[in-house]
Structures are given as structure tokens and as C-alpha cells.
Image (cartoon, helix red, strand yellow):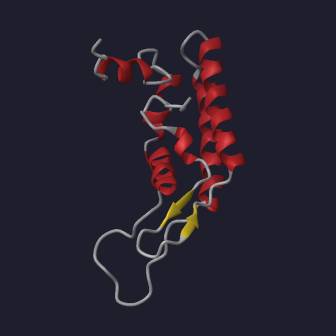
Amino acid sequence: MPMINSFGMNLNSFADHEVVNPTYGVNKPVLISTASVRDMDRLVRKINQAVDDAGGVLSTEKAKHHRIRYKELLKKVDTECLPPEEPPGKPKRGWVKRSKARNLLERLRDYEDDVLQFMENTLVPFTNNLGENDIRMTKVQ
């Protein structure tokens, strides 16, 4: 079952996998270890359990503690999944292509407040599964 957080990101896509380069047909491994994915999964689930145990909202100091752990884990993953280097030669306009794992890492870092909002706001669910089911077309019998 994919783990979808409150921001609608599938955290399972963070896992180790290989990306096939369509130009050269070469497999390039995405450098995020399965252990880091497992650590992120455990951390977010542990935060969700703490929210449930606290009755829906964490105290400010507990939320701050979890945010620190979240940032530490993202820093660890950032060292495993380095940003792409500029290709040699004449610089090209635009962005250098990033892997799916790198894009997800950057979104988790850039939108930290949105991702962890379920800790401090009872109106924000841990997952968006109900929202996804509401907008999905019902199967015609």
C-alpha cells in the first residue's frame, strides 16, 4: 500500500529503483538507500501515532522535536541523493534534469510545513486517501 502523506506525496516513490536513460539505454541507480526510505516511513508513522495518542494535536515542544528529527533525516538523505551536476561544456538554459527521488526530496524539504501540518491542525488528515477516493470515478456496474 503506498504511503501518501497529507501533502499528497507518495513516499514509497522515494525507494531505491533504477531509472533507464532513454537516450543511452543505460541504467542509472537512484542513490537513496532503502534504509533511508524505511527511516522516513518509520518517522512519519511515529509522528502520526504521537498525534493520535495526543488526541489529534501535538504540543509545540513535541512538534518542534519531530520537526528537528524530520530535518535531520532529510539532511541524511540529501547526502545520499546529490543534486545533478552541470554537464561539461557550454552551459545550457533552464534546469538540469533531476531524478524523481531528488524532486521528491526537494519537495519534502521545501514544503515541510505543509507535509507536517497534520501534527498541529486537526482539520488536516495524515493521508489524503479519502480525498483521492472522493474524486475518483465510481466504477460503473
Judge left or right: residue 29 versus residue 10.
right
Q: Residue at x 60, y 47 (%)?
A: 15
Which residue occupies the foreground of this view, 124 or 96? 96
Q: Residue at x 41, y 15 (%)?
A: 123
**Residue 91 image point, x, y percent:** 34, 84
- Eyeballing the image, is 93 above or below 140? below
Q: Measuring from the top left, give residue 89's x and y in whole percent.
A: 40, 90
* Residue depicted at 72% across the width and 47% down the height: 35
Depicted 91 relative to depicted 61: above or below: below
Relative to 118, 35 lies left or right: right
Residue found 69% across the figure and 41% down from its top = 39
How many marks the image carries: the answer is: 0
Quarter containing the N terminus: top right
Quarter of the rendering occupied by the C terminus? top left
Q: Height in image: 73 above or below 50?
A: below
From this viewpoint, is residue 61 visible?
Answer: no
Q: Residue furthest front?
A: 141
Q: Nearer the viewer, residue 98 or 83?
A: 98
The image position of residue 53, as x and y in percent, is 65, 12
Residue that sits furthest to the bottom in the current view: 89
Residue sitting at the far top: 55
Residue 84 in sight:
yes
Q: Which quadrant of the figure has residue 56?
A: top right
Query: Quadrant of residue 133 in the image?
Result: top left
